[in-house]
Image (spheres, rainbow, N blue to C red):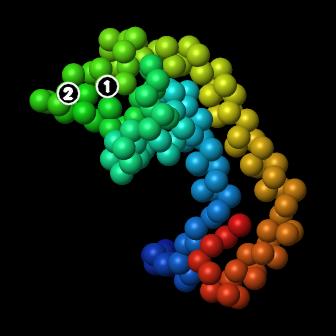
């Protein structure tokens, strides 16, 4: 008689997933490149200006768009799409102009950053493993 196939039990991870600092750095660089290319500002001003911080010089130039501008322009009954863009009449024209000016740099960054991080991870494998051991001994929930 044939043996019955046993069902595999779902095995849970024994250790909690740790925050990878290199992964966070790579994601921040990629997000910054995208916001610079599409919206004309770096990541932090894009996210926080108009919400947590009053508008500063980082988003007062033509074609520089913050998340606050996007939300206010999309919400029904919100302000008209003008905000800090006196030269362009629509959001899409502003984004198109930003992509025309910053697009090649953005695409280059989006392509080269993962390649560079992969190379750095290979070159620094041994020191990173030693640092991860020390972090593990100190019970710090991070990896390098």
What residue appears at the point 62 percent right and 28 percent down from the top-left corner?
106
Q: Answer few, some or many: residues within 10 Å of disc 2's Cα (few below 14, many 20 plus, some between 14 and 19).
A: few
Q: Are marks 2 and 1 in contact (CB under 8 Å)?
A: yes
Query: Can you say whether 86 is above or below 11 in the image?
Result: above
- Asked whether the viewer can see residue 133, the reply is yes
Q: Answer few, some or many: residues within 10 Å of disc 1's Cα (few below 14, many 20 plus, some between 14 and 19).
A: some
Q: Nearer the viewer, residue 2 or 15?
A: 15
- Residue 57: x, y in percent? 48, 34
What residue appears at the point 70 percent right and 43 percent down from the top-left corner?
114
Question: Is residue 6 found left or right of 75 in the rendered image?
Answer: right
Quarter the C terminus occupies: bottom right
Mark 2 — residue?
A: 79
Numbered tag placed on residue 83 in the rendering:
1
Give the alpha-carbon distance from disc 2 to disc 1, as whole Å.
8 Å
Query: Quadrant of the rendered structure where residue 46 is?
Result: top left
- Residue 43: x, y in percent? 51, 42
């Amino acid at each position: 008689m044939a043996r019955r196939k046993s069902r595999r039990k779902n095995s849970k991870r024994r250790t909690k997933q740790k925050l990878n600092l290199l992964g966070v750095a790579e994601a921040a660089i990629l997000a910054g490149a995208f916001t610079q290319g599409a919206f004309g500002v770096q990541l932090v001003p894009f996210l926080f200006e108009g919400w947590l911080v009053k508008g500063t010089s980082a988003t007062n130039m033509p074609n520089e768009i913050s998340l606050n501008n996007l939300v206010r322009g999309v919400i029904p009954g919100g302000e008209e799409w003008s905000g800090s863009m006196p030269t362009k009449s629509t959001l899409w024209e502003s984004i198109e102009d930003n992509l025309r000016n910053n697009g090649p740099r953005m695409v280059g960054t989006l392509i080269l950053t993962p390649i560079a991080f992969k190379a750095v991870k290979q070159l620094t494998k041994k020191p990173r493993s030693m640092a991860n051991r020390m972090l593990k001994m100190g019970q710090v929930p991070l990896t390098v």
